[in-house]
């Protein structure tokens, strides 16, 4: 299959490329080759390329930076996916897009999970623009998959790598302990995308994280436990963290728990976040397999 991957230099795109390149012809573009915010370029270029599938890995992902760069964030996260949906319909190619737990706002009681159709109430620029991107897709094409993920880590700079580096150089770290969600390994999100396409599950929106829930604080403790690092991990509340922040900080969802029932009903099972973390640490050479 001829697959166009946009945002091909990003973190998720690395595992998407690795998974899909064996059986498919990939066309890789990032902002230099195809700026997804440029509607005319998107329509003319993609019409010429005639992909059979478009996987959009492009996004503005700096959640705090978005609070100050509203216009750019809107262009990349809302206008960009809308442009891709318009051209996807024109060339009759399904569009795969990645969204986020931030669309919900996260104010549900911590004992409850979000299902796909729950009320959206984003509280950050990033969350609002990602929701607008979803709406732009739904309005412009029927053949789409929107995978809502959270706490993503994979190749390159990410939370696990940051905490490993901190653990190796500090005796103690302080980590937020009142945000609840599912760390998600980019390779497992990629497998969800791959299975959805190969099994031809119904088009639509799917919560797509690793299974199980934790906090950033407990996640860090697990990273250190598995890596045999003795660094002390101290919890801090989100409110306290925000008070101490030197730069503007976007509001984070306290509850990012997303039910995977819809994905399971479509025949896709996802590994737990603990299992995923172990595989990541082995792949990165941090622990033995
Ligand atoms: N990282 C997370 O924790 C997280 C959580 C939930 C959802 N997501 C979503 O997952 C997806 C992948 O995230 P990631 O962490 O791999 O992102 P990333 O920031 O690593 O990569 C994004 C890529 O998009 C490219 N890009 C930016 N503007 C562009 C434009 N105008 N045209 C074309 N390309 C452009 C960037 O150059 C970059 O290569 C995104 O949709 C993101 O919103 C990420």
Image (cartoon, rainbow, N blue to C red):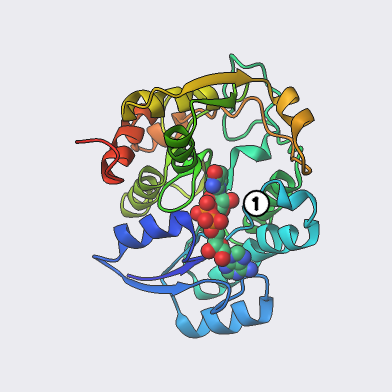
Secondary structure found at label 1: loop
Query: Splitting the image into four quadrants, where does ligand 1 fall?
Result: bottom right
Kindly indicate the quadrant of the structure image that contains residue 267: top left
Kindly indicate the quadrant of the structure image that contains residue 261: top left
Q: In this orientation, does residue 239 appear? A: yes
Please tell me whether residue 14 is drawn above or below residue 115 in the rendered image: below
- Left or right of 197 on screen, residue 109: right
Residue at 41% in and 45% down: 189
Picture coordinates of residue 271, whole percent (x, y): 33, 32
Kindly indicate the quadrant of the structure image that contains residue 244: top right
Q: Which residue is mark 1?
A: 62
Q: Is the residue indicated by label 1 positioned so its CB lies within 8 Å of ligand 1?
A: yes
Picture coordinates of residue 79, whole percent (x, y): 70, 64
Q: Nearer the viewer, residue 262 or 65?
A: 65
- Left or right of 104 on screen, residue 247: right
Q: Quadrant of the N terminus?
A: bottom left
Picture coordinates of residue 61, whole percent (x, y): 62, 52
Residue at 72% in and 64% down: 75
Please tell me whether residue 48 is drawn above or below residue 238 in the rendered image: below
Tag count: 1
């Amino acid at each position: 299959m001829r697959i166009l991957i946009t945002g091909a230099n990003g973190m998720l795109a690395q595992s998407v490329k690795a998974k899909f390149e064996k059986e498919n012809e990939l066309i890789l573009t990032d902002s230099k080759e195809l700026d997804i915010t440029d509607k005319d370029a998107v329509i003319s270029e993609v019409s010429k390329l005639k992909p059979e599938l478009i996987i959009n890995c492009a996004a503005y992902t700096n959640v705090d930076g978005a609070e100050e760069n509203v216009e750019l964030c809107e262009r990349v996260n809302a206008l960009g996916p809308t442009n891709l949906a318009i051209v996807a319909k024109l060339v009759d190619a399904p569009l795969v897009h990645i969204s986020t737990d931030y669309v919900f706002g996260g104010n549900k009681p911590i004992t409850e999970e979000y299902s796909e159709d729950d009320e959206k109430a984003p509280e950050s620029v990033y969350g609002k623009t990602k929701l607008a991107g979803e709406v732009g897709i739904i309005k412009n094409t029927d053949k789409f998959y929107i995978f809502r993920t959270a706490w993503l880590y994979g190749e390159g700079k990410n939370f696990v790598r940051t905490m490993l580096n901190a653990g190796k150089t500090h005796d103690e770290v302080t980590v937020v302990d009142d945000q609840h969600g599912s760390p998600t390994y980019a390779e497992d999100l990629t497998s969800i995308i791959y299975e959805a396409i190969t099994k031809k599950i119904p088009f639509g929106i799917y919560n797509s994280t690793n299974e199980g829930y934790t906090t950033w604080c407990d996640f860090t403790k697990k990273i250190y436990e598995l890596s045999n690092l003795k660094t002390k991990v101290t919890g801090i509340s989100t409110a306290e963290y925000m008070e101490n922040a030197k730069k503007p900080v976007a509001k984070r969802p306290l509850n990012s728990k997303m039910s995977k029932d819809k994905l399971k009903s479509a025949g896709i099972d996802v590994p737990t976040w603990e299992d995923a973390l172990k595989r990541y640490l082995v792949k990165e050479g941090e622990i033995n397999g």
